Image (cartoon, rainbow, N blue to C red):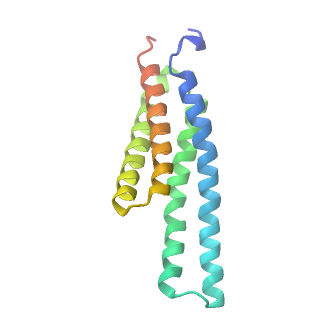
């Protein structure tokens, strides 16, 4: 079978590359939050509650970014393998569910700027999942 016969290949590859880029940026932002929290705590200029909130956000964002990074790498690596389409499909569903949940939380709190980023992540996760689903439909 030729790789060009896979209908979801390009969707997976493009979405995977974008997930890799966004996840690396997310990891860098997480590290900045953690370092800023540690630096603020060392000089004693911030309230303790704000310090804990900043560091908690940084620590919680690390596994989310790592999951996105791994999903992106696997999407790019396995975009031409229909035998791995089920794994990629499950990863896409988890990414989409997480993005949808994050969007709902942001919309309920009224943050329109962060909601725009969530819409982008949700759209990207849906495209990733669609690419995996199309690869699953390919006869082997």
Residue 138 at x, y = what percent? Answer: 45, 14
Is 99 rendered above or below residue 57? above
Please tell me which residue is depicted at 60% across the width and 39% down the height of the picture: 18
Q: Is residue 113 left or right of residue 104?
A: right
Q: Which of 39 and 139 is in front in this view?
A: 39
Q: Nearer the viewer, residue 77 or 97?
A: 97
Please tell me which residue is depicted at 44% across the width and 42% down the height of the picture: 122
Q: In which quarter of the image is residue 110?
A: bottom left
Residue 40 at x, y = what percent? Answer: 62, 83
Q: Quadrant of residue 44?
A: bottom right
Residue lying farthest to the bottom in this orientation: 44
- Report the number of numbered marks: 0
Residue 12 at x, y = what percent? Answer: 54, 29
Name the quarter where the N terminus is drawn. top right
Q: Is residue 85 left or right of residue 109?
A: right
Q: In this view, does 118 lie to the left or right of 31?
A: left
Please tell me which residue is depicted at 48% across the width and 22% down the height of the picture: 83
Is 80 rendered above or below residue 19? above
Residue 128 at x, y = what percent? Answer: 49, 33
Q: Which of 84 and 89 is in front in this view?
A: 89
Please tell me which residue is depicted at 42% across the width and 28% down the height of the picture: 86
Is 115 rendered above or below residue 13? below
């Amino acid at each position: 079978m030729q790789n060009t016969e896979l209908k979801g290949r390009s969707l997976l590859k493009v979405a995977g590359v974008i997930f890799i880029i966004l996840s690396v940026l997310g990891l860098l932002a997480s590290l900045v939050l953690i370092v800023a929290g540690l630096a603020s705590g060392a000089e004693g200029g911030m309230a303790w509650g704000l310090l804990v909130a900043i560091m908690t956000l940084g620590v919680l964002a690390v596994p989310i970014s790592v999951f996105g990074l791994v999903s992106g790498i696997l999407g790019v690596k396995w975009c031409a393998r229909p035998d791995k389409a089920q794994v990629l499909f499950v990863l896409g569903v988890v990414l989409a569910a997480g993005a949808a949940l994050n969007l709902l939380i942001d919309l309920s709190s009224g943050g329109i700027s962060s909601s725009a980023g969530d819409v982008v992540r949700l759209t990207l996760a849906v495209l990733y999942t669609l690419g995996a689903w199309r690869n699953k439909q390919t006869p082997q």
